């Protein structure tokens, strides 16, 4: 029996919960920040210790990276915004739209109409995708 080479893939980070996504969005917007800065940016009714605990758990999951700066713990996103958005969209596509990209896009546009600028960008992206498909 031939031996197969096994590539080790880094463990995938889980999809963030709504609360985790709020923290990630603040970090993507602000850049590396302390718990206090994120807590203030969130403007939620929950306490500082709740934000701290959530960010500690997110660090354990690999969603955040923690470092020390001037004796303060500084956190930054451990996952890229675009990658996270793609993974959330793929999950939503599979769970709610039965794999139909068309229905996902139509649902998104019905829920939040796009501006003329956004529609133009969508058209340019679709044109690029069509050209790639034709060149295969």
Image: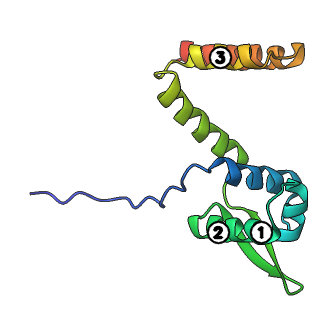
In percent of width and height, residue 42 lies at 85, 54
Compare marks 1 and 3 and give the one earlier in the sequence: 1
Q: Compared to 117, does 37 lie above or below? A: below
Element type where label 3 sits in the image: helix
Q: Which residue is mark 2?
A: 59
In percent of width and height, residue 99 lies at 47, 23
Residue 3 lies in what quarter of the image?
bottom left
Q: Residue 34, can we see it? A: no
Instruction: Tell me the crowding category of disc 3: few under 14, some 14 to 19, or many 20 or more residues within 10 angstroms, Cα based.
Output: few
- Numbered label attached to residue 107: 3
Residue 61 lies in what quarter of the image?
bottom right
Compare marks 3 and 2 and give the one earlier in the sequence: 2
Which residue is depicted at the point 73% across and 18% down? 111
Q: Residue 18, can we see it? A: yes
Q: Which residue is mark 1?
A: 75
Image check: 28 left or right of 135? Answer: right
């Amino acid at each position: 029996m031939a031996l197969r080479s096994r590539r080790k893939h880094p463990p995938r980070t889980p999809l963030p919960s709504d609360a985790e996504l709020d923290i990630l969005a603040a970090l993507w917007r602000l850049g590396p920040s302390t718990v206090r800065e994120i807590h203030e940016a969130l403007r939620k009714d929950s306490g500082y210790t709740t934000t701290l605990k959530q960010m500690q758990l997110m660090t354990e999951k690999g969603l955040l990276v923690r470092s020390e700066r001037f004796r303060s713990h500084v956190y930054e996103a451990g996952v890229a915004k675009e990658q996270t958005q793609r993974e959330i969209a793929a999950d939503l596509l599979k769970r709610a739209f039965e794999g139909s990209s068309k229905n996902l896009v139509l649902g998104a546009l019905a829920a939040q109409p796009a501006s003329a600028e956004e529609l133009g960008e969508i058209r340019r992206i679709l044109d690029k995708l069509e050209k790639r498909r034709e060149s295969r």
